Amino acid sequence: MRDANAFAFRRALPRMSWSVRNLFNLWQRSLGNNVITFNNTSKSLFQQRWTAKALMRAYHGDFINEKIFKRWYLPATLPDVRPRNRTPISDTLALDDYAGRNEQLERAIRRKEEEDRKGLAPVGSLMMAEVERRIDVFIFRCCFTHSVYEARRLVIHGHVLLNGRKHTNANTRLAPGDMVSVDPASISFLQESAKSNHRQAPENVDEENSTEKLTPFNLPPYASPFIFLPAYAEVSFPTCSAVYVRHPTARPGYSEIPTPYDADGEIVRLAWEWYSKRRPRNRSKAQMARMPENRH
């Protein structure tokens, strides 16, 4: 962890962690007294963008150096989701009736109504898609660790296999189809807790023998708000492994990038405005040699 006071209540910055203090900070930024809104503020546009950038970076890869983040993890552009000029549905109604394509027309009408209801896809959150590809972040998203900091430690200490081989580079960005396996002995909540050992009576020997093959499962307190799996991960908990199926994407009304903020809100938009003006555009040969491993 880069900052010992990462979960300080004064700053209330949500992180990638199941910590109780982090849960309180997440509540503060969602419903509490520290909710950020720029509708009525005395801050300048520069200050609003900087505040939004700080909130996004605190959650998405606060352990990544800012210069490295801007050079290697920011996309050059975001996908264009503006509606294209299409032939109006009413102009093709007679032709579809004549050709017998009424079912296709009905599906097109329902699709258009759904798009109009949900709005445009929240592509602003996709600026963090490269961070989600990191092997340490992926392990945290698969609920194998209670924080991304612990996931980094497991990778660096050699407790993680990538496609069946030991992998110790936490900066690796995964490719679709990569399989990540974690040693069950290194997962903290799959170990026998000290409280359960004290509670067991010495005369229950038969019960211990009957349940000795069962794997203990001891989640930390208040972990339920963080137990979810993203759509781009295929997780197998019996084998403690997961497959990175595809890159995260977004569609109208939904984004696959887990974030504590509105995927199409003002914080995400202002953060992208900040980085779109300040990301480095040139990469020399020396910089390309230091690029984190990218498996495409």
Image (cartoon, grey):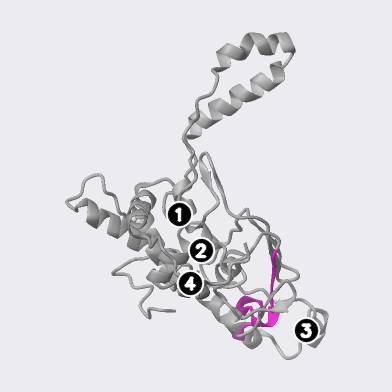
Q: Secondary structure at mark 4?
A: helix
Query: Is residue 28 something one can see in this rendering?
Result: no
Residue at the disc numbered 3? 208
Dot 1 or dot 4, earlier in sequence: 1
The residue tagged 1 is: 76
Amino acid type, label 4 = Lys
The residue segment tinted magenta is 178-194
Mark 2 / mark 4, whichever is N-terminal: 2
Q: Residues within 10 Å of mark 2 (few under 14, many from 20)?
A: many
Q: Position of residue 162 (x, y in %)?
A: 69, 73
Q: Residues within 10 Å of mark 4 (few under 14, many from 20)?
A: few
Chain-order first, disc 2 or disc 3: 2
Report, in whole angstroms, how far the alpha carbon at label 3 lies from the one at label 4.
Answer: 61 Å
Task: Specify whether 172 is left or right of 163.
Answer: left
Foreground residue among 290 and 157: 290
Mark 3 near mark 1, Cβ–Cβ under 8 Å? no
Dot 3 crowding, Cα within 10 Å, few <14, some 14–19, many 20+: some
Q: Is residue 175 above or below residue 217?
A: above
